[in-house]
Image (cartoon, rainbow, N blue to C red):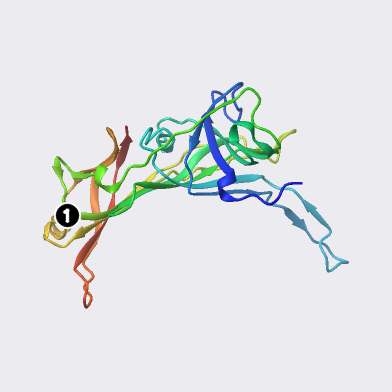
Amino acid sequence: MPETYSAHESRVYYVDETEYGQTPANPSMLSVPAESIEPTVNPNNIKLRGVGSIDLQAIKKGLRAPTLKISYPLPSEAPINFLQYAKAELNKSLSVQVLYYKGVFAAATDIISLLHMGCKFQRATVECSVEDVVKASVELLAQDFAAGIAKITGASYADHAGAVPFYESYIKKDAATLERVTDWKWTIENNLKQVPVIRTPNGNVLKYLPHRHRDLTGEVVFEFESKEEFDDVVNDAEFSLEFGLGGTCKAVFTGCKWENAASPTRIEELVSLKAAFVAKTVTIS
């Protein structure tokens, strides 16, 4: 029996599905260079009580709800390969495999496989700060979950490397590059709906996972050199924001308005301006 596993003995790989909830045969798995991984499965047990006893009379499984949280730096080799699936317009599902192993990955032993099938992005947050790299934190909901002790039969596993440092990112407001920004982040919230139906078999597994109304929000932190953002709020200005994600990749939010603008001022600190925004649409390309 192996010793407990360490973080360096874990990896995450994904492949898009051609049929919802079905991992393709002989898949070409691509890596997510994760900093943290949190797979969770909740059986949503139904707890039954009745007269005549102070204890539970039965515990029945409910709707199985697998989730997966991943934080990772965008790999410079392929910054948006994984992130693009946060777009509801694609309406794509993924099979995502978390692997724990011993030894060299190519000849790994003592494997524990947690395979999440029918995954869609519930939420994705991307952020960048001075003296850091562009990072993403995502949460996926899955249709089903399987634990195993091997890699996927016939699968190939490829890794993406590199990172996108802050000086290879940028932010534009309409056509103008903003050179006062120290931090930025944005979030896509897809508000997925887990839809089960009464059926046999697999009645405890959801049947559909549709997207609902999407929320697009974010925040930009400026060095306080201008009153422009306050003017935008007063004038109810609408604009677009473009965020550089490495190479030619970018996320463009259109129909943006500032939700609020604030300039916290404290002793012995430089004045900054924090401006939160909401957007109508987004493209990631």
Pick the residue in front: 17 or 192: 17
Work out whether 30 lies above or below 234: above
- The residue beneath circle 1 is 180
- 236 with respect to 10 (left or right): left
Work out whether 267 lies above or below 10: below
Q: Position of residue 42 (x, y in %)?
A: 65, 50
Q: Residue at x 44, y 35 (%)?
A: 82
Pick the residue in front: 229 or 134: 134
Q: Residue at x 67, y 45 (%)?
A: 63
Dot 1: element: loop
Q: Is residue 68 visible?
A: yes
Label 1: few (<14), some (14–19) or many (≥20) C-alpha neighbours in 10 Å: some
Q: Position of residue 13 (x, y in %)?
A: 54, 35
Q: Residue at x 38, y 47 (%)?
A: 135
Work out whether 158 lies above or below 147: above
**What is the three-letter code of the residue carrying label 1?**
Arg
Q: Residue at x 33, y 52 (%)?
A: 132
Q: Position of residue 230 (x, y in %)?
A: 15, 60
